[in-house]
Image (tube, rainbow, N blue to C red):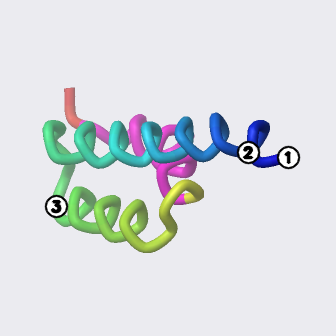
Amino acid sequence: MEIILFPIYIALVVLWIWSLVDILKSEFKGNEKILWLFVVLFLNAFGAILYFFIGKDQKIS
């Protein structure tokens, strides 16, 4: 069981770090950057998944 869960855990950690880096490198309107940072920091993997489905569309080109 641990052998199956370990790669999933590693993938979620990578996704979490990737989303934090993407948020910090991107530009957002108003306070959206701070909001997304808090969402990802406090909701961990779920926050990172939310960011990639919803937050990436809110970035300024």
**Is 51 part of what is drawn in magenta?**
yes
Identified by mark 3, the residue type is Gly
Name the side, left or right, on which 28 lies relative to 2: left
Mark 1 to mark 2 CA distance (whole Å): 6 Å
Which percent across, then down, holds residue 36? Answer: 34, 60
The type of residue carrying mark 2 is Leu
Mark 1 touches mark 2? (CB < 8 Å): yes
Furthest-right residue in view? 1
Residue shown at 36% from the left, 42% from the top: 19
> Is 38 above or below relative to 16?
below
Local SS, label 2 = helix
The reply to whether the C-beta atoms of the residues labelled 1 and 3 are less than 8 Å apart is no
Residue ID for mark 3: 30
Q: Which mark is residue 1?
A: 1
* Circle 1 or circle 3, nearest the eye: 1
Q: Position of residue 32 (x, y in %)?
A: 27, 60
Image quarter of residue 4 = top right
Q: Residues within 10 Å of mark 2 (few under 14, many from 20)?
A: few
Tell me the element at label 3: loop
Cα distance, mark 1 to mark 3? Answer: 45 Å
Q: Quadrant of the C terminus?
A: top left
Left or right: 26 as drawn, with respect to 9: left
Name the magenta segment's main secondary structure: helix
Residue 10 covered by magenta stretch: no
- Nearer the observer, 53 or 6: 6
Query: From the viewer's perspective, is the residue at label 1 or at label 2 nearer?
Result: 1
Segment tinted magenta in the rendering? 47-59
Indicate the amino acid at tag 1.
Answer: Met
Under circle 1, the secondary element is loop
